[in-house]
Amino acid sequence: MPHASALIQRNNNGSQLESGAQVWVISSQSGTTYSVGFEKEFVKKHLFCDPDPPSDMNAKATHLVGRVNLYGNLTGNNVETLPTTLDAATLRFLKLKKLVLARVSQGQCSVCHQKITQHAKICGNCGHLHKKPWAGGGACGVDDGSGACACADWAAGAGGIVANGVLQACTGYVSNDYDLHRTSKGKANPFGGSGGACTGTNTVVLMDEIDVQAFKDVVVNAIQNENTAGWPPGQWKAGEGVPLEFGANTVATIKSDDSLLTFNQRAKAKGVKVHIKKGLDEVYRIYHFHDTIA
């Protein structure tokens, strides 16, 4: 049976469509059908799938460790070593860490790690650092503590971002290492597009560990239960959130700086709570994980 990851919609290049562009028409085994959409880049941030299921365990682990270290260097995480004991749980951790690092890196400069919308540049005339993009000329006007800067014109110079009080030089925005790596291999970035990256701590649904029909049944039944309780169009079910229970070990919390030990210290969950908005167009839009279900 196909996994729930088959539901994720992609463009012709293999990249995931932005969450706002995805609408899934899903039917439960009972025949009830709903149109389900997403907001706040819900799909990219919270629905994880691995396009490369493991074959040889040792080779897969070595591959994953290499990717973790490549993408992990973006945020200065500790270097990962090949675990001495290899099992399915260890591979799951390595897979999840690779995926969360790939998502966290989206929209970050691979040199200074600043977001593309805030990529810092230095004025070539006065040397002041500006924590936002500058285009063309214009007065500098930076107050360095002694009054407004006397520099009258902006001149693009080397850029950078101050980290721990030290300026890290950066001549310009460079796509994140994950994107560069995928491009070098002639592969699409499956997480590309606007909408921002997920945070360094993320609650994720393991789509490859859920049967596609079971996923549909859970979502349809949850919406149906809320409709029975009364749900006018244009309103959303917030509060404590709507529970989606997919089964044991189908949800995990992963941090970008996790070790195998810290990851395993957090129990796996069987589901999540989400907010769902019932649109006037009868599309139920899911967004913002509220909490895990024990």
Image: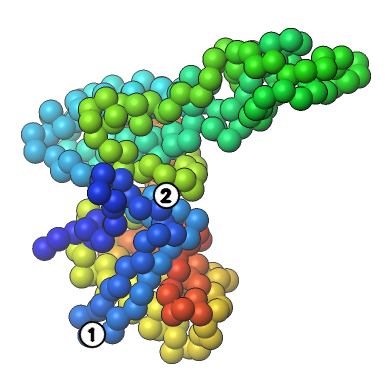
Camera-side residue of 11 and 268: 11
Question: Residue 225: x, y in percent?
Answer: 40, 83
Q: Of the residues shown, which amino acid type is indicated by label 2?
A: Lys
Q: Is residue 130 left or right of residue 10?
A: right
Image location (x, y in percent) of residue 76? 46, 22
Q: How many marks?
A: 2
Seen as rendered, the residue at the extreme right is 147
Q: Considering only vertical position in the picture, is 61 above or below 239?
A: above
The picture places residue 285, in percent across and down from the top left corner, at 45, 69
Question: Dividing the picture into quarters, in which one does residue 81 lie?
Answer: top left
Identify the image quadrant of the C terminus: bottom left
* Residue 211 as seen in the image, left or right of residue 102: left
Q: Residue 183, how many percent across, how many down?
A: 29, 29
| Amino acid at the residue labelled 1 | Gly
Image-quadrant location for residue 218 = bottom left
| Tag 1 residue | 31
Compared to 168, does 200 lie above or below? Answer: below
Give the residue pinned by disc 2. 45
